[in-house]
Image (cartoon, helix red, strand yellow):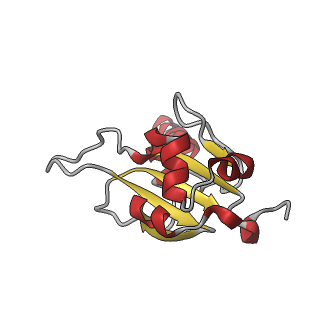
Amino acid sequence: MKIRILLSAAALLVLGACSPAGVNWTEPRTAGPFNALITQEEIAATGATNLYDVVLRLRPMWLRGRGMQNFGGQTGMILVYQDHVRMGEIGALRDMAPNYVVSVRFLDAASAAALPGILPREIVAGAIIVRTPATDPAG
């Protein structure tokens, strides 16, 4: 009986350590073999008029779902968040002006799954996080 209780407690500790503790909205994270952060300086250097073009020029891999599919063949989507608010899918970047953006960051599928507003049936391949001065801790 004591062994069963100890094993159950150990399993809970392991599972608790593996569960996401939330999303760190400010710290850059490398998401695979490419740089996961676009800085304000990089954004300005592109001369682009919307964030979609910025990402397309600087990190085109972010715009691809990387083949994540469910059993029905549905491909995972890339979500866009601005200042902790879900804006939609990749197309939302076309409506965002880069002028007041502090940074743009990519989250892999595992990290994106912890974001607010993800519905249980949604297949998420990643997320693009847009930070403006409203959420910049330095500003």
Which residue in the rendered view is the most extreme toward the right?
Answer: 138
Count of marks placed on residues: 0
Residue drawn at (68%, 65%) of the image: 99
Quadrant (top left/top right/bottom left/bottom right) for the N terminus: top left
100 w.r.t. 19: above or below: below
User: In which quarter of the view is residue 91 placed?
Assistant: bottom left
| Residue 10 in sight from this viewpoint | yes
| Residue 117 in sight from this viewpoint | no
104 on left or right of 110: right
In x, y percent, where is residue 83? 63, 68
Q: Nearer the viewer, residue 32 or 38?
A: 38
29 w.r.t. 40: above or below: above
Residue drawn at (60%, 35%) of the image: 35
Quadrant (top left/top right/bottom left/bottom right) for the C terminus: bottom right
Which residue in the rendered view is the most extreme toward the top?
Answer: 33
Residue drawn at (69%, 53%) of the image: 44
Which residue in the rendered view is the most extreme toward the left?
Answer: 72
In x, y percent, where is residue 23? 60, 55
User: In which quarter of the view is residue 68 placed?
Assistant: top left
In x, y percent, where is residue 116? 51, 66
In x, y percent, where is residue 121? 28, 62
